[in-house]
Amino acid sequence: MNQVRYMPIDDIVVTNPYLRLDTGIEELKKSIRAVGLIHPLIVSSTGMLLAGGRRYAALRSLGIEQVPVVVVDLDDMMQELISIDENLMRLPLNTLEMEQALNRGREIYESIYPTAKKVDLSSEGLERKPPRSKRDASPSQDAPPPEPPADIEDGKSSYVEVTAQKTGLSEGAIRSAILRQTRSSEQVRAARVHGELGAGQANELVKLDPSEQDKLLPLVKDRPTKAIRKIVSEAQTLGVDAIVQKVAAQEPLPKEYEVLIGALEKVAKVSKQISRKKLRCPEDEQERFDTLLESAIQALEQIRDA
């Protein structure tokens, strides 16, 4: 087991690109003043900081010269994987930074453990829907990643499975993030950077080859995910060029209509359930129900007759 020891904070090398040194430092300083440092920093045998960027920044800001550390003697790739693991616990899901970190972690993990199950990077990988799980609340004072479970050490589980265990993210979310990073065309990535395309929209586009993504991208940027899913499905069946011509010739459906159509689909579904179960509206809610129903019918008739 690695032992905690103290070392001068000035001797710690902070060049790790995955470290986060500027988020919530003031709150962390208050915690350290009150209860001390709960989790030591993790450094390599050469003094490079691997995990605990916020703790390091808080300690330096407090003027603490000798800091508790755990020294791990690992090769460069394993050290990078440790840093990625810690950073994943702090990153918002569905961001390019998260996707890049997850994919780099996958590359390292599959290199270190060549017998592990490989992540399916084909478009079929997007269709898999494993059980969902929730990310646990972030530990106080940026707790370092937990000890690797046995399946990491034997190198048999896939990176997706292992990362889900460590972070609490669902396997589906992790797989989708990796696939967005590996399958997106350069133009799709640029659209994500500029806020023109969301993760859900990109999930549909990456089912196509990069050149096909680029052909569709200008026509679908402003469309909701559900509409893009339909367009991509048709492109897979009829060919992208045919769908590009079809979509270009169509009059765009206003977003308000997309919202309304979605709401009507839900109303139709729930109405069938109520009818099938022969549910009755309570008397004290009947008047409100009748008023809303009449108002909705009048508004829909006005739209239809306009």
Image: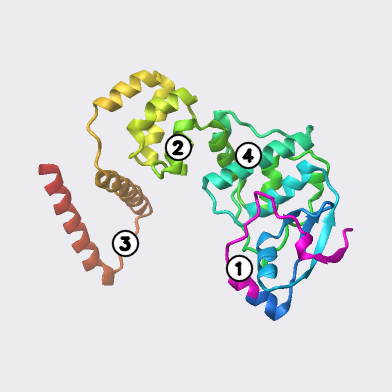
Disc number lying in front (3 or 4) = 4
The alpha-carbon separation of the residues under discs 3 and 1 comes to 56 Å
Q: CA distance from mark 4 to mark 2?
A: 18 Å
Give left or right: position of 227 versus 167.
Answer: left
Q: Secondary structure at mark 3?
A: loop
Q: Amino acid under label 3?
A: Arg
Query: Which mark lies nearer to you, 3 or 1?
Result: 1
Foreground residue, 303 or 76? 76
Q: Residue at x 44, y 24 (%)?
A: 212
Identify the residue position indicated by label 2 in the image: 190
Element assignment for label 2: helix
Question: Looking at the image, is mark 3 or mark 2 nearer the viewer?
Answer: 2
> Residue 37 in the image: x percent, y percent?
74, 72
Q: CA distance from mark 1 to mark 4?
A: 28 Å
- Against 85, residue 228 (above or below) is above
Q: Residue at x 19, y 63 (%)?
A: 291
Tag 1 residue: 25
Q: Give the residues in magenta.
A: 1-29
Q: Earlier in the sequence, mark 3 or mark 1?
A: 1
Question: In terms of sequence position, does the residue under pointer 1 or pointer 2 come before the other?
Answer: 1
Give the spatial CA distance, label 1 vs label 2: 31 Å
Image coordinates for residue 117, horizontal then vertical, percent: 73, 34
| Three-letter amino acid code of the residue under disc 2 | Ala
How many angstroms separate mark 3 from mark 2 (CA)?
Answer: 52 Å
The residue to which callout 4 is attached is 103
Dividing the image into 4 quarters, which one contains the C terminus?
top left
Q: Which of marks 2 and 4 precedes in the sequence? A: 4
Which of pointers 1 and 4 indicates the residue nearer the eye? 1
Is residue 72 in the magenta section?
Answer: no
The label nearer to you, 4 versus 2, is 2
